[in-house]
Amino acid sequence: MPTPEAFGLAHLWEQSDLIIRLVAFTLVVMSVASWYLILVRSVRQVRARRHDEAVEAFWGAANLDQGLERLSKLAPDSPFEALARQGCAATEHLRRHTHSTTLGGTLDADEFVTRAMRKSIALSTAQLESGLTVLASIGSTAPFIGLFGTVWGIYHALVNISATGMATLDKVAGPVGEALIMTAFGLFVAIPAVLGYNAFTRANRLELSELDAFAHDLHAWFTTGTRLPSAPVGGPAERAGTEASKTSAAHATVRPGAA
């Protein structure tokens, strides 16, 4: 009677055919790709925690150049830096050509800056979502690939048992149990991918909402020269204090012509 040690991954690999080995290789590749994306995205999320600090440092700068320098230092290659630089470039381009006799001289400043910032947000959104499709595909297909390996392994085992003419329970349980390993392997690949996809999707949604708020403030600053104050919270005394602090902060922050 075969012992439990006689069955396992090594025995399954020795007894498997080309189909089972291809399924196992596919799951290994999917697992490696999934964990690579999870690690890369996790590192990026750790770096993204400094974005709030970078935005506050930008608004506390004395001029635009200093604000961009602070963004580059605290949040290099971030969507916030790209958005600020895109808005600055659009404003400078409009300033240089707004008095010309060409079609560009008739452009509305508000619309021009808005479109430039929307382009930056669209590019940043595509960059943030990079790799999520792979995680979603792995999470949704890995269980079925593993199940296919199980079905094929059971079929292969039953054919071998039928050929030997020994269909007793001890002869069937081992090969069938080995085939079920493929289903477990598929779940092992799929579960981290699904959890990572959900976590990164939520993180991206929060970051894009913060980026949209930053774009709103930038747009107000580029078109009016002052940052849009936040909505006051609390009673009349609190609101008066908030407005006073916002007014004093507006005089201490960056100015459009200070570049």
Image (cartoon, helix red, strand yellow):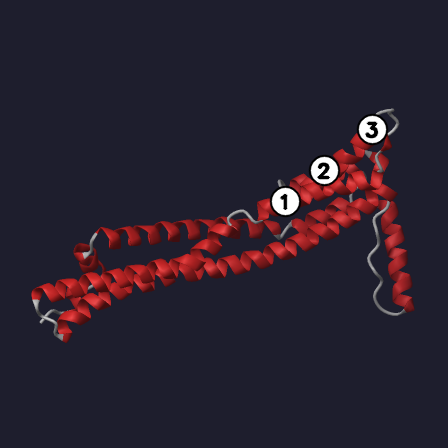
Callout 2: SS: helix
158 or 28, nearer to the observer: 158
x then y, percent, for residue 165: 8, 68
Q: Which residue is mark 1?
A: 124
Q: Earlier in the sequence, mark 1 or mark 3?
A: 3
- Tell me which corner region of the image, top left, top right, bottom left or bottom right, holds residue 190: bottom left
* Residues under numbered marks 1 and 2 in contact, where contact means CB atoms less than 8 Å apart: no
Position of residue 160 measured from the top left corner of the image (x, y, whole percent): 13, 62
Q: Is residue 75 visible?
A: no
Q: CA distance from mark 1 to mark 2?
A: 12 Å
Q: Quadrant of the N terminus?
A: bottom left
Q: CA distance from mark 1 to mark 3?
A: 29 Å
Above or below 240: residue 70: above
| Residue labelled with disc 3 | 103
Label 3: state its secondary structure: helix
Dot 1 amino acid type? Ser
Q: Amino acid at mark 3?
A: Leu
At 64% across and 57% down in the image, what residue appears? Answer: 206
Which numbered circle lies on residue 86? Answer: 2
Q: Position of residue 245 (x, y in %)?
A: 87, 56
Q: Residues within 10 Å of mark 3 (few under 14, many from 20)?
A: few
Of the two numbered discs 3 and 2 in the rendering, the one whose residue sits closer to the viewer: 3
Looking at the image, residue 198 sits to the left or right of residue 157; the answer is right
Q: Mark 2 or mark 3, which is nearer the start of the sequence?
A: 2
Locate the C terminus by quadrant. top right
Up-down: is 83 above or below 4?
Answer: above
Residue 27 picture quarter: bottom left
Which SS class for mark 1? Answer: helix
Residue 6, quarter of the rendered image: bottom left
Q: Residue at x 25, y 60 (%)?
A: 152
